Image: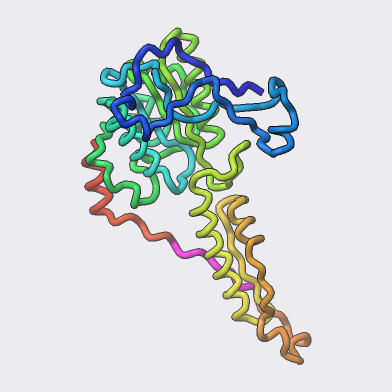
Amino acid sequence: METNIESLGPARFRSPLHRIATSNVHFRTDAERVLMDDTYSDAFGVQDHAGKVSFEIAGPREHIFFDPPPTTAGIVTCGGLCPGLNDIIRGLVMELTHRYGVTKVYGFRYGYEGLVPRYGQTPMVLKPDSLDAIHAFGGSILGTSRGPQDVPEMVNFLEEMEVDILFVVGGDGSLRGANEISLEIRRRGQLKSVIGIPKTIDNDIMYLDKSFGFETAFAEAVKAVSCAHVESLGSRNGIGLVKPRSASISMARAASSRHFTTASPAANTPSSSSRKAPASTSWKAPATQSTPPATSAREISACS
C-alpha cells in the first residue's frame, strides 16, 4: 500500500508561520512518520521498521511549495451532509488567510457541479469576516450534490479560475473523484494540489479511530433509539421502530450501546398471553430544526 504523499517539487518558500513565536509552532519534516501499528510490542520489540506500514506525520513545514500571497485556494463539499462541514470551511479560510496570508479563497457551490460552468453556479469568495458564525449552523454554506461530473471540464474550470490548491471534503466516491482530478492535472503537467478531507458519520475510514461528525450523529441516533424504546414500553407487546435513511453504522452502534432491560409493564399481566397482540408501534424522529432563514441568508449573501 502506497502511503507516501506526492510532492509537486522543491519547497522554496519560507513558511509564514515563522512570524509566530517558535514555541507555538512545531514544524515537522517529511521524514517523520508514524507507525500504523503503534502497540508497544510492535514499536519497541522490532528494531527494523523498513517493512512496516507508516504515514507521514501531520504538521506545518518550515518551507512550502506555494508562495502564499499570489496563491488561490478552492473549497468544495460533496456527497451527503455531515456535522462539522461549516467548521471545516471556516477553519480552512481562517488558517489560509490569517496564518498563511493567502489572499483569495473560492467556495464552489453544490459539490462538483460548482466546477462545471454549464450549471451556472457562481463561485463564492470566502472571507473570514463573513464566515465568523457559520460553525454554529448545520449543513454546508456551499451546498452539496452527488454524482460524477466530467473531469476534464472541471480541470478546465480550475485552470480558468487559476486555482492552485483545491480542498475536497467528501466521502469515498467524492475522494475517488478528487483522485481523478489530480490524475488529470498531472497528465496536463500542471502544478496544482488536490487535498482530500474525508467525511463520514459512519466512522468507517481505515486507520482512523474517529471521523469528524460521528460523535454528533451517534448522539442523535441514541436519542432516536431511546425514544423508540420508550414508545414501545407504552403498549402491551409494543415494538418501537426507527427507520434510518440507509443502513447506518451510527444507528447500529447507538442501538448496541443501549442496554434496554426494562420490560413493558403490561408484559407481566396474567391474562396478557391470551390476548391478541396489538399492531406494532412505529416511531419517526422529529424533523431537525432548520437554520433560521434570515440568519442563513445574511451569512450566505455576505460570503458571495
Q: Quadrant of the C terminus?
A: top left
Task: Name the chief secondary structure element in magenta.
Answer: loop
In the image, 63 versus 221, the foreground residue is 63
Q: Residue furthest top?
A: 189
Which region shows up in magenta?
279-287
Q: Is residue 106 visible?
A: no
* Residue at 25% over, 52% down: 295
Residue 103 position, x and y percent, is: 25, 25
The number of callouts visible is: 0
Using residue 9 as the reference point, say whether residue 268 is left or right of it.
right
Residue 35 position, x and y percent, is: 63, 30
* Residue at 27% over, 32% down: 98
* Residue at 53% over, 29% down: 57
* Residue at 26% over, 43% down: 300
Q: Is residue 257 visible?
A: yes
Residue 115 placement: quadrant: top left
Using residue 35 as the reference point, say whether residue 95 is left or right of it.
left
In the image, 145 versus 62, the foreground residue is 62
